[in-house]
Amino acid sequence: MTDDVLLRVSGVTVSFGGAPVLADVGLEVPPEGFVGLVGPNGAGKTTLINAISGLVRASAGEVVHDGRDVLPLPSHRRAARGIGRTFQQAQLLDGLTCLDNVLLGGFAWAPWLGWLAPRRRAQVRELAEQALADVGLADLRHHPVADLPFGVRRRVDLARALLMRPRLLLLDEPLSGLSSAERGAMAELLAGLPASGVAVLMVEHDVDWVRRLCARVVVLDYGVKLADGPPSVLDQPAVREAYLGTAQEDQ
Amino acid sequence: MTVRRVSLAAFAAVLLALPFAGSDRWLSIVVLALFAVLGAQALNVMVGLVGQVSIGNAAFLAIGGFTAALLDEQAETGFVLACAGALLAAGVVGAVASIPAFRLRGFYLAVSTIALTYAVLYVAAEVQNHEVGASGFRMPYPELLGVSLDSDVAWYWLLLPLAAIVTLLFHLVTRSSLGRAAQTVRDHEQIAPVFGVSTRWMKTAAFAISSGIIGLEGALMAYYVGTVHVENYTLLIAIEYLAMVVVGGLGSAIGVALGALLITALPFLLDDGLRAIGGTALSARTSDLTLIVTGAVIIGCLLWLPGGLISLPARVGAAIARIGRRGGKPTAEAPADVAVVREPAAVSRPAAAPATVSSAATAGSGGDDPLLQVTGLTVTYPNGVTAVRDVDLRCPKGSATLVVGANGAGKTTLLRALTGTLTSEKIATSAELDRYRGETLLRRSPDELTAAGIALVPERTKVFPGLTAAENLDVVPRRIAAGADRFVTRDDVLELLPRLAAVARTDAALLSGGEKQMLAIGRALLTQPRLLVIDELSLGLAPAIVRDLLEKVATIRGEFGVTVLMVEQAVRAALPVADRVVMLRHGAVVADLAADQWTDASEAALIGGGEVVR
Ligand SMILES: Nc1ncnc2c1ncn2[C@@H]1O[C@H](COP(=O)(O)OP(=O)(O)OP(=O)(O)O)[C@@H](O)[C@H]1O
Ligand SMILES: [Mg+2]
């Protein structure tokens, strides 16, 4: 059982004072899996990602990553164990260039590089440039991120997460703010991740792409899991009602 | 780059020549300045690099001074061990002092370092009274490697390499991966752990290293001055060091070194100057005047050189480039896509430049009377990038215009230029004609424009953090002129966006991404806009909500004649709401057509142009 599961979340509960934002939520991501996480605004999707990556403390439950419960670990130790993530609003260092921002991703596995080990440093840099090229931003590597459009910033965010060389990548709405052409390119990149050994848990509101990319979809509805299964669960009446709106006749 | 190298080399040459060529007075000033460099570099690690504001320098200087005095005087350890002990003691206290920083930030943290200063000074006073009494400790002339440190020249040769090494080390650290991690703790503390950065470790290390070096400085200073007395350590010292860091350039080791040199030398320079011009009449008051002028220089730096001395070359360069652009014949030299000054418009311009899509007749729907008319709008950012190029836009009353294009096509800049949120002297905005209800929009403040009925749902900063969601909505109606008809009520907003009712009492900063977007839209609607400008309505919203909102936009447009200008990536979804579609590419309009003429070919053209930015 543990063999074909990279991440197993079970019974996770999170509350910020009031009613729980997540109540007893569970899901599984296989290695080389691509799992979608959808639900209405405020359902707790980002909170679940925060709980897995350690930015938010879960009051109960287990998050087993690679055979070990990581809930007791602080966030930076989880990063070192191969959990990477992006943010719904790309959080970048505005004073730095795209490349410098991406390089931060290398800290998780090569924290002491600098003037100490020039060869390793060059290697990290090469990987960072590759990650930027992968997200289609090779030309902008020396451009400061401060004045970049929203959609470009989030690609820098993704490149940074990729440089972490994660085994599990948590993506918070990677396609939002992108034009349809850019979505296609980004989706192609994402689709290739599992084959390269990166399992993905993706929050996304673009249902078309969720259907196409995800092998499995989990639907959250205000803190509770509504459905979990192949993308066709999106067609269940309860899911339509809660998420897509009842009058949905679908693209 | 080479200019910088050359000036650095020249600077180093002057420093090295100083003991041989300079006057005694200048040598002693430079020795003081080198002490300052050491302390300022240390403070910069904490404040500039990791973002932990500290006013505790005096405490660590005192710890260093007193530890050295006790070790050398009482334990007779000698110079080197006394200094090492001072470094260690201050470092340990610094590490302990970092514990409040796990919870406190900014102002509160600064206050905790002031408290630390008083606690340390209290203990120091007790020690001093107990050991030596009111006169304070006397320090012997130290000896290092057989050389007696009894002259400024000797101190100079000890301090110069020390200051240079510390500066170089921190300069390298700043640019290393460790430095980037530190900056992440400074700028985005919440997310730093996601990249394997332990914020506690980072803060403790910064405090310990910084305090240790300041302790070392305190010990050396004690030997140099020859006495250790508790009254020599005041909060004023800490403020002075902060000034060095800020004037030099927060976070830049080279800048901080310059700042320390300048702030130390400035009073002496002024003193000389005042004596020279004022003679005896002024010289009686020089110390007062010097203080005032020094203060003025610091304030001036903060106001006009917020990046610090280190940013001066870049600022000067930019200014020269600006003047050059204004003066010369820029359009001829600059490549077409970064042209800054637009050619004076020819008498007639094709309605839509190289249109890849069948350009349609210009007949707008919804009447001839434009609520908004823009002709030849060009926006250039300070870095020379022209984000919007010669854009014409005509929005008849009650019309809905959809602006589409790839990321970086200039959509957001266009909307911001029209809603006043681009107002900044450094951003060049120009238009031959821009009219909103007969008046110009350019260079008017966002609040004026809001009062005039223009509302923006911005792409990025959407809500007022610190206010609840409900308070965010309540902010708005007070800005609306009493006479304006209110066609959107708070109840309407809550009915349309029921989620907002559920989170009404949550701090807006904590809302989910979609909830923030809802709040921004609700707030914009509540301003009862005549012109509603939306930058990506669908951003982060669940499909059902997007549909409801688009319907609402159609309704208020139909019923109340609100004019809509929206940027939207979900073109298909927004199309039914719009009657015109304007396509931007590299800042220019490449198509302007009626919504019902939007075809698969137009979509293909949009996608075809959808490569990367700028
Ligand atoms: N730190 C916090 N304190 C209080 N409430 C919070 C906090 N963080 C999140 N919430 C609330 O928890 C709920 C779930 O938020 P979350 O960000 O997980 O939603 P989401 O599913 O990601 O929504 P969206 O699709 O809009 O991004 C929201 O109502 C939000 O207001
Ligand atoms: Mg979210």
Image: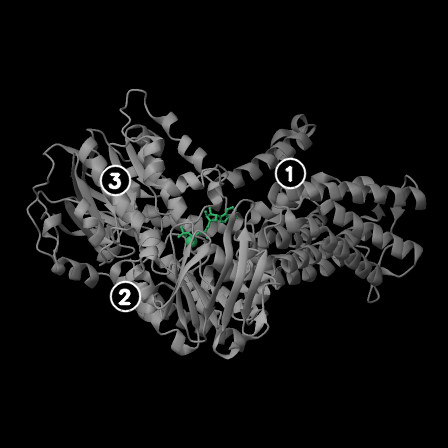
Query: Pointer 1: what residue?
Result: B272
Residue B310 coordinates in the image, percent (x, y): 52, 51
Instruction: Indicate the quadrant where residue B190 lies.
Output: bottom right
Could you tell me if the residues under marks 3 and 2 are in contact, i.e. CB atoms within 8 Å? no
Could you tell me if the residues under marks 3 and 1 are in contact, i.e. CB atoms within 8 Å? no
Please state if B271 lies on the left or on the right of B297 as rendered.
Answer: right
Question: In this view, which residue lies farthest toward the front?
Answer: A237
User: Who's the residue at 59% across and 54% down the image?
Assistant: B50
Name the element at disc 1: helix
Residue A4 coordinates in the image, percent (x, y): 47, 78
User: Who's the residue at 49% across and 46% down the image?
Assistant: B510
CA separation in Å, label 3 and label 2: 29 Å
Q: Assess disc 3: are there few (<14), some (14-19) or many (≥20) residues with their C-alpha within 10 Å of its C-alpha.
A: some
Please report, as a chain letter, where disc 3 is located.
Answer: B
| Badge 1 amino acid | Asp
Q: Is residue A111 above or below residue B97?
A: below
| Badge 2 amino acid | Gly
Of B124 and B556, which appears nearest the observer?
B556
User: Who's the residue at 58% across and 58% down the image?
Assistant: A60
| Badge 3 amino acid | Lys
Instruction: Indicate the quadrant where residue B236 lies.
Output: top right
Instruction: Indicate the quadrant where residue A160 lies.
Output: bottom left
> Is the C terminus of chain B in the top left, top right, bottom left or bottom right quadrant?
bottom left
Q: Which mark is residue B552?
A: 3
Q: Which mark is residue A184?
A: 2
Q: Which mark is residue A156?
A: none
